[in-house]
Amino acid sequence: MSSTTIGRVVVGVDGQPPAARALDWAIAEAQRTHATVQLVHARAMPLRVPAPESPFAAHTAESDEILGTATERVRTLAPGLTVTTASAYGNAAALLSDVSRGATCLVVGAREQSALGSALLGSTSLDVAAHAPCPVVVVRALPEQLPDRPGVVVGSDGSELSEAAIAAGFEQADRLGLPLTVVHAWYLDYAGTGLAALETSDVRLQVTQEEQALAAEALAGWSEKYPDVQVRQRVVHGHPVEALVQHSRGAELVVVGSRGRGGFTGLLLGSVSHGVLHHAHCPVMVVRPGGGV
């Protein structure tokens, strides 16, 4: 790959541990892609209207400290990277999404899993994953060091959404020099239909063969484009969220597709991407068709 700068990695920073993990991931990604790093800090609007020359200045002491610490982290880990900063009042997700237009990816942190589980992912992480105009990487947990690690994991279901995810998965696996595990999960959902008795062994065999063919079709041509990427295909009977979360153990990254749409009118992620973001054991990249890779 050429050493010429080819992109911009945007990362949200706020001085908290989740953002620090996201920053380290963003630095490594910028090194791999020879991109610049843009540090973005959103500040809450003061409750009182301030004097024109004070808190509404371009930077405050707090934002300068946060951005300065993050900048020093970039220079320590990757002295050759170009770093820019942006700081403004406003909603963090809206600011990050606006700044990330044209970026290679947007990276945000999220709190680690706890007894409360999915309640702790955070609204900013979910909002940017649903609405940002570029691929979004949510870093809650860094990869576990396990034997027989699956490399990059991508979810596939034969749709346009998974086509975008597969493209991003191959690109990431190629950059990292890791294998790509493509997980195609399916299950027969008869809940509430009274048709559970129809799931005979013959029906399951037929559906399995159809899903295997669909999974193979989704990968057609990609190995020719990325001949150095070792591909492992997993066609499993089960819920796609459970399958992807299981395969995320020890993975460097899980890639999922999502529709999303503009405007902060509510959570617009699909159920699979939403579930994987909440429960995966490694960073998760969310991509949308036409949203760039």
Image (cartoon, grey):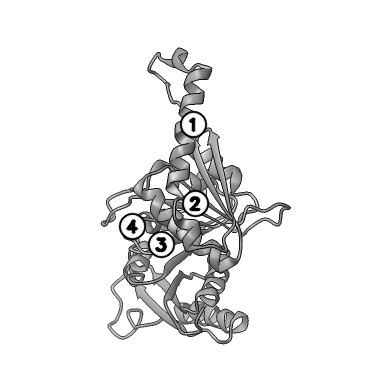
Tell me where residue 24 appears, x and y as whole percent. Answer: 58, 70
The residue positioned 71% from the left and 53% from the top of the image is 146
Q: Nearer the viewer, mark 2 or mark 3?
A: 3
Report helix, strand or loop for mark 4.
Answer: helix
Q: Nearer the viewer, mark 1 or mark 3?
A: 1
The amino acid sitting under disc 3 is: Pro
N-term mark: 2 or 3? 2
For marks 1 and 3, give the CA distance: 32 Å
Tell me where residue 187 appears, x and y as whole percent. Answer: 48, 30
Tell me where residue 10 appears, x and y as whole percent. Answer: 43, 72
The residue positioned 34% from the left and 68% from the top of the image is 95
Instruction: Indicate the quadrant where residue 42 lies.
Output: bottom left
Tag 1: Cα neighbours inside 10 Å, few (<14), some, or many (≥20)? few
Report helix, strand or loop for mark 2.
Answer: loop
Q: Nearer the viewer, residue 271 or 264?
A: 271
Viewer can see residue 92: yes
The amino acid sitting under disc 1 is: Gln
Q: Nearer the viewer, mark 3 or mark 4?
A: 3
Residue, disc 1: 209
Residue, disc 2: 121
Residue, disc 4: 131
